């Protein structure tokens, strides 16, 4: 791994934005319980930080999907590699994703989870690259930051499984 990474969002900026989203979700679901669905592995950092900023009864569950081969290009094929542990019927489900790019992943996930009859299905993503959208049937309820069409890493996001542990979000500059 010899890429140069330049900081785009600092840990502080990310924490501040997540606190805002957490407050909005807390307000919207006041008096109810929510189920956070963390999409592995990219959204682990976002999910844990967001969970701490939502002041409601909560269940956290995990789902693993893959849409990418190695490298930075999508294949367009979405596989569920690990399913949820719990039934989500009649639950307020919040999908927590790291980034929406082509939209294939969230479009597919939304369809799969809707079939299980949740009470509500909300989509929350840390990052959004609107310029890259291929499928447009996804309504994202909460977006941390919109970014241009550049590959980013850190705060859970990887490049060939590396850089997830960076505490900030950075651009990869190919050498
Ligand atoms: P989509 O299905 O094309 O919307 O892609 C969503 C998934 O692609 C995300 O969950 C990420 O795992 C991955 N992805 C898309 N863009 C990036 C990026 O810039 N950096 C790292 N992973 C990305
Ligand atoms: Mg991902």
Image: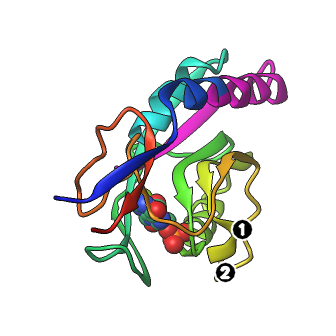
| Coloring basis for residues | rainbow
Q: Quadrant of residue 22?
A: top right
Left or right of residue 75: residue 91: right
Name the residue nearer the viewer: 36 or 32. Answer: 36
Q: Which residues are magenta?
A: 17-41
Question: Few, some or many C-alpha atoms within 10 Å of disc 2 (few <14, some 14-19, many ≥20)?
Answer: some
Asked if one can make out residue 60 in the rendered structure from this viewpoint, the answer is no
**Separation of residues labelled 1 and 2 (CA atoms):** 7 Å
Q: Are marks 1 and 2 in contact (CB under 8 Å)?
A: yes
**Residue at horizontal 62%, vertical 18%?**
57
Q: Residue at x 55, y 37 (%)?
A: 36
What kind of element bears circle 1? Answer: loop
Q: Determine the residue positioned at 71% across, 31% down.
A: 21
Q: Residue 35: image x %, image y %?
A: 58, 35
Residue beneath the point at 83% across and 30% down:
28
In the rendered image, residue 145, in percent from the top left (x then y), is placed at 66, 47
Give the left or right position of residue 125, taking residue 24 as reference.
Answer: left
Q: Quadrant of the N terminus?
A: bottom left
Q: Quadrant of the C terminus?
A: bottom left
Farthest residue in the top direction? 55
Residue that carries the numbered disc 1 in the rendered image: 138
- Label 1 environment density (alpha carbons within 10 Å; few <14, some 14–19, many ≥20): some
Residue on which disc 2 sits: 135
């Amino acid at each position: 791994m010899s890429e140069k990474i330049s900081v785009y969002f600092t840990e502080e900026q990310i924490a501040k934005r997540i606190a805002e989203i957490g407050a909005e979700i807390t307000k919207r679901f006041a008096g109810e319980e929510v189920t956070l669905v963390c999409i592995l592995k990219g959204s682990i950092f976002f999910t844990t930080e967001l969970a701490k900023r939502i002041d409601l009864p909560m269940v956290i569950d995990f789902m693993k999907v893959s849409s990418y081969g190695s490298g930075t290009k999508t294949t367009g094929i979405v596989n569920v590699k690990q399913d949820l542990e719990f039934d989500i019927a009649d639950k307020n489900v919040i999908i927590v994703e790291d980034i929406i790019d082509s939209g294939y992943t969230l479009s597919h996930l939304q369809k799969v989870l809707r079939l299980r009859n949740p009470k509500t299905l909300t989509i929350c993503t840390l990052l959004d690259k609107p310029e890259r959208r291929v499928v447009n049937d996804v309504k994202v309820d909460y977006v941390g930051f919109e970014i241009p069409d550049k590959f980013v890493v850190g705060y859970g996001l990887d490049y060939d499984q590396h850089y997830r542990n960076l505490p900030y979000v950075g651009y990869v500059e190919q050498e």
